[in-house]
Amino acid sequence: MKRLMRPAVTRTFLVCIGLLLLAAITPVSSAKPLPLEPPDPGRGIIGVKVKVFPPAQTGWGSADVVYFVRVVEDSDRFGAEGVISSNYVKGGQIYLLNAKPGRYVAVGCEFVLGTAGDIGKVAFSRADILQSEVEVTAGGVVFMGAILAESSTNTQELDQAQAHYLRIIAPAATSKGFMARAFSGDYAYTAVFTSIVRDQAVAKAFWNKAIAKHFKDEPAWSSGLAARSLTPGGIAAGSTSTASSSDRFLSVVCVDVNTAKARASGQPQEAAKIAHLICESIMTDWDSSGCRENVDQAPCKKRLASFDGSLKSAGSSMLYAAAEAGETSICSVMLAMGSDPNAAISTGKTPLMIAAESGRPEVVELLTKASVP
């Protein structure tokens, strides 16, 4: 009996040795990822972080993919028939590289559920899609925000946007009940933002990490990111692509200021929504007062002074923010109102210093002249 079994054992042993040798010489771990496509100077970049809290789970899960829609018509925000997937992710930071210029919104995302490796697909609510809106310019870099979203398995009471985009990003899952989705591994959720933060400090940290870590082996991208103009946040909900750069800049400042105020008043979860509603009214008043055409008017100066007071209480200033963004006309008005180009903010930097660091030669010249007694 022992003699009859020996050949089978020997064959098994040889097969195992062969498999081990094959595994040893197969260069799996040494394989390098394909290089990224080269940066297109006529296109822009979107960066975003999304963390989702899934139902009946513990801890937040970082999204690996975000689904975007490029807004050509206003109705596209909630009814586009196609989505654009992010094309690079590292360390929880998600990028859409070489994005065509235009307005973009985030309509959903994907994330890994726990250690099982199952994928959860999430559709954002109509109100949150509006909050995510940003505008990409040729050669520009825009931070959509650091988003926390709480998800739900309830796919019966969907708003228009959630129903539409779940059908697109999770077509198999939407036709099944919850238990059927769970057994098949097709997890579809709806979600609402609990917060979206995209102030200058968070945006800078995001892009500094991108340059130092995520694109360190991609010199064309890391140097390109360092040279491009960074936009800290998005445009106000309902804005149009015809708005001037000053309008977009002021909209970002307005949202940041009023988000901070709403948080301070004890409304952290609704802060961003409240800020957008307030700023829609403020920017409408700004336009109706003629500030878009001529910022050097009494109502416009009053609004800038109000922003300046809020920013100073947070350790910055209107002149500093405008200098960093390259808003020469607003810098001129702030100087005329008595702002000091050499007054340091909480970081120790002055408007003149940040203008030089940000590559704003016209602002540097303006502030230098103002600094001469």
Image (cartoon, grey):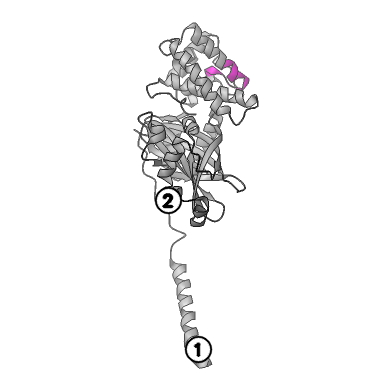
Q: Which mark is residue 5?
A: 1
Identify the element where label 2 is drawn.
loop
Of marks 2 and 1, the one in the foreground: 2
Determine which quarter of the picture holds residue 82: top left
Determine which quarter of the picture holds residue 53: top right
x and y percent of residue 150 in the render?
A: 56, 40
* Tag 2: amino acid: Ala
* Tag 1: amino acid: Met
List the residue tagged with mark 2.
Answer: 172
Q: Inspect the magenta stretch and tell me whether residue 313 lies in it.
A: yes
Examine the rendered structure and indicate whether residue 76 appears above or below residue 178: above
Magenta region: which residues? 308-319
- Nearest the viewer among 55 and 251 is 55
x and y percent of residue 119 in the render?
A: 49, 51
Identify the element where label 1 is drawn.
helix
Examine the rendered structure and indicate whether residue 131 appears above or below residue 362: below
